[in-house]
Image (cartoon, rainbow, N blue to C red):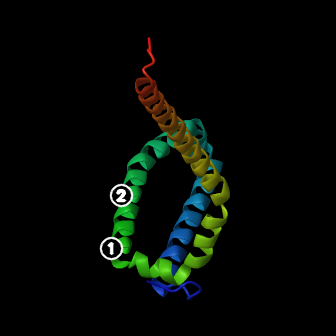
Amino acid sequence: MTEPGAPPNPAVLLVAGVAATAVGGAVAVYRGAERLPVVGDLLRRSHTQMVARGERALVPIKALIADVAAQVVELVLDELDLNELVRRRVDLIGLANEVIDGIDLEAIISRSTDSMTAEVMTDVRTQGERADDAISGFVDRLLGRDRT
């Protein structure tokens, strides 16, 4: 794997140069052929057909390129230690601080304690009412009162 900023591989530069020359040559030949009396007329008339044929030819080429790219990505990912890469390239402390800063902890605690306080108060009131009823019943029996 080449390092960022490293000079390109000479073989890659050679292939790119050959491809650019071939494409440039093909364009020059096509433009020259368009100027010929018989061939030029045929080329101009069949231009739309040739474009459509070229588009159809690109479909399997795009599929092949996508397949090769997926395989290359898989090979690269197999060779990478993503944990080490993240440790070296990501400020984890800064990221954690940013996440924590984005959490409104005060509001969360306030909401949770408000609901807990309300539940506890309801329970205390209910238990107080039961205790009051029990004591009232006991006193009524003690004093011989009729509870009906």
Amino acid carrying label 1: it is: Asp
* Residue located at (39% from left, 67% from top): 73
Quarter of the picture holding the C terminus: top left
The residue to which callout 2 is attached is 67
The residue to which callout 1 is attached is 78
Q: Are marks 2 and 1 in contact (CB under 8 Å)?
A: no
| Whether residue 104 is situated above or below residue 93 in the rendered picture | above
| Of 144 and 41, the residue lying toward us | 144
Tell me if 143 is positioned left or right of 41 in this view: left
Which label was assigned to residue 116?
none
Asked whether the viewer can see residue 126, the reply is yes
* Residue located at (45% from left, 83% from top): 11
Asked whether the viewer can see residue 42, the reply is no
**Residue 99 screen position, x and y as percent:** 61, 65
| Whether residue 118 is situated above or below residue 19 in the rendered picture | above
| Of 20 and 107, the residue lying toward us | 107
| Whether residue 95 is situated above or below residue 134 in the rendered picture | below
State the SS at label 1: helix
Amino acid carrying label 2: it is: Asp
**Residue 65 screen position, x and y as percent:** 41, 59
| Mark 2–mark 1 distance (CA, rounded to whole Å) | 17 Å
Determine crowd level at label 1: few under 14, some 14-19, many 20+ residues with C-alpha closer than 10 A. few
Q: Earlier in the sequence, mark 2 or mark 1?
A: 2
* Residue located at (52% from left, 81% from top): 13
Specify the quadrant of the image occupied by residue 92.
bottom right
